[in-house]
Amino acid sequence: MKEVAPLIVSISGIRGIAGKSLTSEIIHNFAAAFASWLPPHSGVVLARDTRPSGADFASTAASALAAHGCDLFDLGIASTPAAKLMVGELGAAGALILTASHNPAEWNGLKLVRADGVFLNGEQGSQVEALYRSGEFRQDPADTIGQIRSVSRAEVHKAYLGRILRDIDTDRIRSARLKVAVDPCNGAGCVFLPELMSELGVEAVFINAEPNGDFAHEPEPIPANLRQLGDAVVANGCAVGFAVDPDADRVALVAEDGQPVGEDFTLALAVSAVTSRQRGPVVTTLSTSQIVSDAAAANDCPVVLTPVGEVHVVEQMIAAGAVIGGEGNGGVILTDIVPGRDAAVGIVLLLEALATSATGSLGTLVSRLPRYIIEKRKVTCTTQQLAHAVTALQRRYPDAYTHPVVDGVKLYFSGKLECPWVHLRASNTEPVVRIIAESSSANEAAALCDEVEKELLGGN
């Protein structure tokens, strides 16, 4: 019998297999714990992506939140960034979003947001988890049961469009008369991206655009899942293809020849565009490609690295006054718009870059950046095996530079903050260990992953 993936509780939220490791009882109790963690009588934004389990789980969460005194602003199907933005717009104390992001359709989960629109950090998440495990939820009198208000899609989109387009050169994008292909993978992006493209005067060819949760392919926007989008780009003569994950906080790119560009290029191109007109710190994670740091350095902007996890990036961006940040998985962050990753922000920045360039070619923009090969793998192993591998690698390469930010271990083999490097860490979203290696040589990147994988699995 195939083992069911366990419930995962991490800095990235709560995730599990719907009906198995993630049940209605778990949803109810985590929602009750969140309500108990918030100030009494708080307003809470409730949203979900399109997964088949989403509607029932949302009803369960709503009942728990209301029973513990929260007033609800129910957005229905909405992207994670839209829900985060609406926390501030509606004066709510937080948000509960039902999504498992890039995980397959049988998964679902909870993302918890605080009053400033930022995900709960590690300490705050631990406080909610402790309440969940104790079952000691705040009890409110029967007459303080919260009210539920449905928020229209029109209200959400008006606020969201206004924020996104505020500082973007929309006239330049409209005048460029761009044609693009978009694959929102039957997720939450289906309900907003058509309106965004129309507002920008962009001719958009949509595929997999029914928000029904019947994902046409595996939803993580990695090259293996972008073939259909590549075909649409070529068949329709598009300048670019945009692949969006189910809760619409990540976007990957396909060039005009139908070939995937690679997730890290989304952030690198966005960083290049923003820092060319505004100097300041750039924040990203240890696992992000060197091309992002190079793009910032080309415009004399310092780079700050954090552990993997959106909240780490956002909190550091706010502390450092960063002009842009994000993660190398296609997550672009402009905290002045939404304090978190946002596929729509990434799309708009790329459209602006294409409209501004002399050729309007994504391939040309990519060719101006350095070329590295990044290899990413997943390995199932124990925490003891992970700890052993980290120690063994540090002993084997005593001259390598170990990055001082702790998230597993990241080693730079030249002794400088440059390629080649390897990052070994436990995943926040799946029961696996991730190996990420980067080099100017594909063979070297693969060899580094081979070496680490062998060490993880007990080889010598």
Image (cartoon, rainbow, N blue to C red):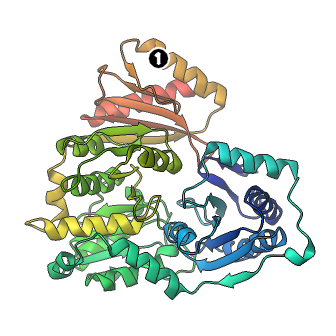
Q: Quadrant of residue 427?
A: top right
Q: Secondary structure at mark 1?
A: helix
- The answer to whether 138 appears left or right of 184 in the picture is right
Question: Number of callouts in the render?
Answer: 1
Residue 389 image offset from top left, x and y in percent: 54, 23
Q: Which residue is mark 1?
A: 394
Residue 82 image offset from top left, x and y in percent: 50, 71
Residue 36 image offset from top left, x and y in percent: 79, 58
Q: Nearer the viewer, residue 394 or 347?
A: 347
- The answer to whether 63 appears left or right of 429 in the picture is right
- The answer to whether 56 appears left or right of 298 in the picture is right
Q: Nearer the viewer, residue 193 or 199?
A: 199
Q: Quadrant of residue 440?
A: top left
Above or below, 277 against 422 in this view is below
Q: Residue at x 26, y 65 (%)?
A: 350
Q: Residue at x 39, y 69 (%)?
A: 344
Q: Residues within 10 Å of mark 1 (few under 14, many from 20)?
A: some
Check disc 1 and give the amino acid type.
Gln
Residue at the left extreme of this rendering: 358
Residue 227 image offset from top left, x and y in percent: 36, 65
Residue 98 in view in this figure:
yes
Q: Residue at x 79, y 62 (%)?
A: 23
- The answer to whether 41 appears left or right of 417 in the picture is right
Q: Nearer the viewer, residue 199 or 67?
A: 67
Residue 191 in view in this figure:
no
